Amino acid sequence: MIQINNYFFEPTKFEKKYREIGNTQRSFSGKVHTQNINKYYNFQLKIEGLSPSMFGNLLYLLSLNRGEDPSNLTLLDNEGNEYTVIIPINGVNYDREEGEEETYYWEMEMWEVI
């Protein structure tokens, strides 16, 4: 179970990937030099079988991260670690699921704020 701001979700898939921004070069003598500019986590989240109210909660969280006065979100992962995150442009994919019941799926990418 994960928490985004004050909302709890049970994801179908949750991945945390460590990212580094920088470059690595080799000198003429063969020695390797690495410059790290930034290090951050990238999160991939998928939730299936969302009720309309939980789907609305995710749309609300998305609206907090957009608009005239955007704010960062707080992610608490299943290991108890807390991260400040944003949702990048084109970082969300959602739609209604097939079937008689009104359920939705939600795929989202989040980046840690450095």
Image (spheres, rainbow, N blue to C red):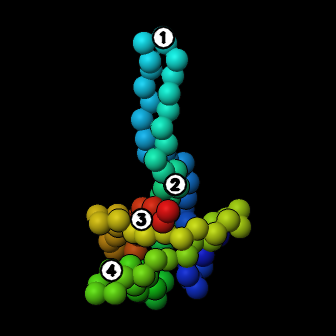
* Pointer 4 local density, CA inside 10 Å: few below 14, some 14–19, many at least 20: some
**Label 1, label 4: how far apart the Cα atoms are:** 49 Å
Amino acid at circle 3 = Met
Q: How dense is the environment of label 3, judged by Cα within 10 Å: few (below 14), some, or many (20 and up)?
A: some
- Observer-nearest residue: 113 or 32? 32
Q: Secondary structure at mark 1?
A: loop
Tell me if residue 81 can be seen.
Answer: yes
In the rendering, which numbered label is found on residue 40? 2
Circle 1 sits on which residue?
Answer: 29
Image position, residue 67 (x, y; %): 29, 84
Q: Quadrant of residue 100?
A: bottom left
Q: Report whether residue 99 is seen.
A: no
Q: CA distance from mark 1 to mark 3?
A: 45 Å
- Observer-nearest of 63 and 1: 63
| C-alpha distance separating marks 1 and 2 | 31 Å
| Residue 81 horizontal/vertical position (percent) | 67, 65
Q: Residue at x 55, y 58 (%)?
A: 14
**Residue 66 - label:** 4
Badge 4 amino acid: Arg
